[in-house]
Image (cartoon, helix red, strand yellow):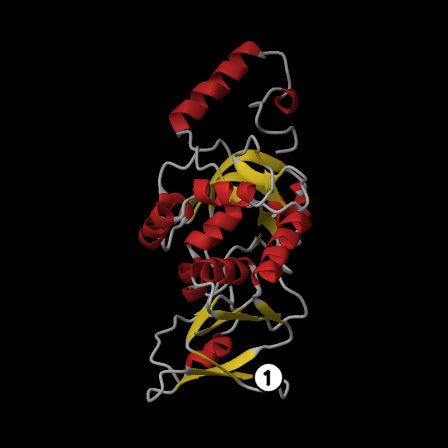
Amino acid sequence: MHIAVIGAGAAGCFAAIGIKRRLPEADVTIYEGGKRQLAKVSVTGGGRCNLTNSFNQVKSLTHIYPRGERLMKRLLKGFSHTDAYEWFENEGVRLTTQEDECVFPVSQDAMEIVNTLTQIINRLGIRLLTGHRVELISHDKENGKYSLRFGGNRSSATADCVVVAIGGTPAASQLNMFSPLDIITENPVPSLFSMCLPGDGITKLMGTVVEEATTSIPGTKFKADGPLLITHWGMSGPAILKLSSHAARFLHEHEYKTDICINWCGGRKAEEVTEELSAISASNTKKQLASAYPPHLNARL
């Protein structure tokens, strides 16, 4: 059996290894459109590679997978974060869990992960072909085989089974490879982006970071929390990036124009904040506001 894996990113390489170990007699080939495998893995996590998370602070999968919690719940039962942790440690990669519950290699070097996966691929005899960008996948119903057509005058290839692991696609046209097949595709929209606030005075506070903020879009259920960074163009940081992910299709449908609400005091309610401000005021009667404020904010904010 010939199995083709399209995409030599983390998912594609990991899938190819899992397939080959379960079907050692199969001919497994990874086709990568770029010049090298695992390119994004080498730079993820600031070059340190955030492999997984301890999930100790995750109360609900809906909070971290806003558009796929049911699917992820089923998948994580088959292969969980602890399975991922054990998998890499069994391959000789020592891991550490940080205070924010993110899991990194002890070496703090993403290339250790790249080299580990590449060495396993080579050891198992999996073929890896870079510079092979798939343009079209067709299926011959008579013999059951798939045909892969590549760009750049590359020779076509056939396979009995095809695994597609191409990651994000910025344009719907990149999904045209599926056009000969009876597969339903969703139009991709941007996700995980910072937000621009042109002309808003808040941008004068660029560089300000609030560790616990809650962001939301008024009139909707879209909400996210975490650190927030004020930039010279608007806002960024996990609280903003997560909100953009939760509301990706909503924002696209509204042409990326919407009001945004920021709770600078995390998830605390107005009554709690009022009580805190009153206590600060009562204990600092002779101080200026610039030197008496909630400790999680800075003087400028």
For mark 1, give the secondary structure. loop
Quadrant the N terminus occupies:
bottom left
Whether residue 80 can be seen here: yes
Percent position (x, y) of residue 13?
54, 61
Q: Which residue is mark 1?
A: 151
Quadrant position of residue 286: top right
Residue 87 higher or lower than 297, as above or below: below
**Is 268 left or right of 208, judged from the image as shown?**
left
Taking the spot 42% from the left edge, 29% from the top edge, the residue there is 268
Horizontally, residue 201 falls left or right of residue 256, namely right
Q: Residue at x 37, y 81 (%)?
A: 181
* Residue 166 coordinates in the image, percent (x, y): 51, 67
Q: Work out which residue is located at the far front of the displayed protein and give it.
A: 25
Q: Position of residue 124 (x, y in %)?
A: 56, 61
Q: Residues within 10 Å of mark 1 (few under 14, many from 20)?
A: some
Name the kind of residue labelled 1 in the image: Gly
Q: Going 54% across and 71% down the picture, which residue do you hit? A: 29
Task: Classify the position of the C terminus by image quarter.
Answer: top right
